[in-house]
Image: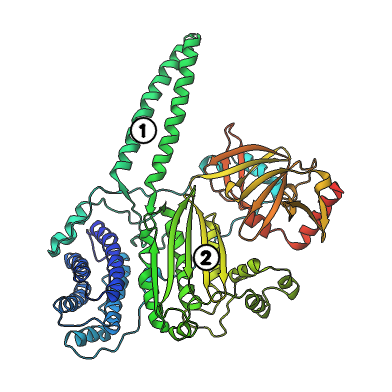
Amino acid sequence: MSVFGGMEDLLQDFLTESSELLSEVDNKLVELEKRPDDKALLNDIFRGFHTIKGGAGFLNVDSMVSLCHRTENLFDKLRNAELTLNPEIMDEILAATGVVREMFGEMSQGRQPAPADPALLKALDDVLEGKSSNASTVLESPAVTPSVLVSTESKPEHDWKNLYDVLLDEKEVATQVTSEPLSSDIEVNSVEHNEVLAPSAAILEPMQSLKPAAATSNARPQANSQQLATQETTIRIDTVRLDQVLNLSGEIGLTKNRLTTLRADIMSGKMDSITLKALDEAIGQLDLLVGDLQNAVMKTRMQPIGRLFQKYPRLARDLARQMGKDVELVISGEETELDKTMLEDLNDPLVHLVRNAVDHGVETTEERIASGKPAKAVVELTATQVGDHIRIEIIDDGRGMRPDVIRRKAIEKGLIDIETANSLDDKQSLQLIFLPGFSTKDQISSVSGRGVGMDVVKTNIQKLNGRVDIQSAVGEGSRFTISLPLTLAILPVLVVKVCDQPFAVPLAMVREIITIRQEHVQEVSGRATIVVRDEILSVRSLANLIGWEEVQLPQFGVLMQSAEHSFILAVDSFIGRDDVVIKPLQNIRPKGVAGATLSGDGSIVLVLDMEDLLASDTAETSAIKTSRFIEQFV
């Protein structure tokens, strides 16, 4: 039972507002450490913390008010030049903001937060009294602590051969499936937040400008129905975008009325050329409007990636202090927009990559000076939109990675054998760091050494239909490039045909389409291959991959490119390019299937997950299938 009885809506609004405000405060504190004489920045931090304290006071959260009040007094002394900011004082301040964030977590579960650790309160009091400060243990913000969710839910496997029978027999599979639900509550921002200092106004004003947030989310099951959602279930939308949706809805309504009139005319036998032309024009107009409406609705889900990036300066600063390194995190492209649902799933991979850059990538200050580098290491986090994709890069100017060392470590840990290692080039060797259990650290620490982090990166990025590429130069640094679609709601696909059945493959993986001729197929190391512009590519039959018998020789090949695989997918024919809405399959889980969609004629088209399909194709099975495939051509 929540202790905030009757105030749940206000509590949720407070947590939404204050969590963002605290993230801004954390970032400004990191900047303040670089520019301790910046009075304007210090005043911004003071006002932000005062607003949080005012909201906590309105909700009668005395433990948070007490902690915020001490920290506020410290800011006041810094403003009046009664104290001089140093790293030890900053450690105490950031430790306090970390505890405030932990208190947010307790409040989100309907509990009054426990008082702050007396040791932290004493440390703040000592700083206020001018006593020497011993740095507290650097606390990481719980908001950016990586976690791996392991699903224990099991769904029955279905064989590819009877999959379509199952889909067609169980009509509800095609009709009941729904895409990921949107939040039912939309938070509309038409003006910027005003910074106010009065405790009651500080929290009442933003609360009045917000709609109540849902306590639970349909997208993620809750263990306790009374427990408030710990994940934000609201989204901020510019009113201009909502106006565009409203205008398009009105236009569609007018077009619908026109079609209704034309339908009545046709039903009454009016089939002259003028009526048919008017019908064609109305349908064309409806097609354009629906497309515009779809784009407008999609834009309402788009959020600036800066809301995610703002968590990481504090993370990098704390970790650098913990490891005795001098690291600056430089962020650019915060205005780049990405689907909100993807932002949430992107947090863990970016946390691991930023931590990895600070922990593994950059050297200590002494090592950098000895090698002729600047004492301060720089880690860059950038985001840009390239076509219909988002490119996120994490770049460090550290020691770089040695492919030979990575191969040796992978062999030592039993992740690959010597023969496999010898067949890998440098680019493929760098991809070994994504293997589960891989780590170059011999000693396990609180930061690294367990070989989990980079595996999480690859797994989560693949779930978002993205890929991760690595570039590294020894002594110069490393670059991790994440490529993601703008949204998961609509997926551009290439629809192909095998055994008279359509399948959809992600267009992001398609490089080009070629014609397969018998004289072009050669056997190399027991695999069917084709040379394309001096590049030897293996040929994988889609029919063989899904376990179907080929009724004819494949006529076409799709050059597929992913982070780990480059190959030619052999198919019978093509239907064309399309933008589809993927529907999850209920109660069935075939390997290699991302979901299903409906074609224009109403038939079911399976959307393939090529990475999963290739991973499930074992070496022994693949050798048998390849042998059969070669026999057909040779």
Which image quarter is the N terminus in? bottom left
How many numbered discs, if any?
A: 2
Amino acid type, residue under disc 1 in the picture: Leu
Look at the numbered disc 2 and give the secondary structure of its residue.
Answer: strand
Position of residue 527 measured from the top left corner of the image (x, y, whole percent):
80, 57
User: Which residue occupies 14% across, 65% down?
Assistant: 199
Q: Is residue 130 left or right of residue 235?
A: left
Position of residue 274 measured from the top left corner of the image (x, y, whole percent):
47, 11
Q: Is residue 507 left or right of residue 49?
A: right
Position of residue 597 measured from the top left corner of the image (x, y, whole percent):
56, 41
Q: How is the image coloured?
A: rainbow
**Disc 1 versus disc 2: nearer the observer:** 2
User: Which residue occupies 57% across, 71% down?
Assistant: 473
Look at the numbered disc 1 and give the secondary structure of its residue.
Answer: helix
Of the two numbered discs 1 and 2 on the same chain, state the one appearing first in sequence.
1
Mark 1 and mark 2: Cα distance apart in space: 40 Å
Q: Does residue 247 lie above or below 2 as drawn?
A: above
**Residue beneath label 2, please?**
480
Q: Does residue 557 lie above or below 359 as drawn?
A: above
Q: Is residue 453 visible?
A: no
**Label number found at residue 593:** none
Amino acid type, residue under disc 2 in the picture: Phe
Q: Is residue 116 left or right of residue 292?
A: left
Q: Does residue 328 lie above or below 246 as drawn?
A: below
Position of residue 14 measured from the top left corner of the image (x, y, whole percent):
25, 61
**Label number found at residue 248:** 1
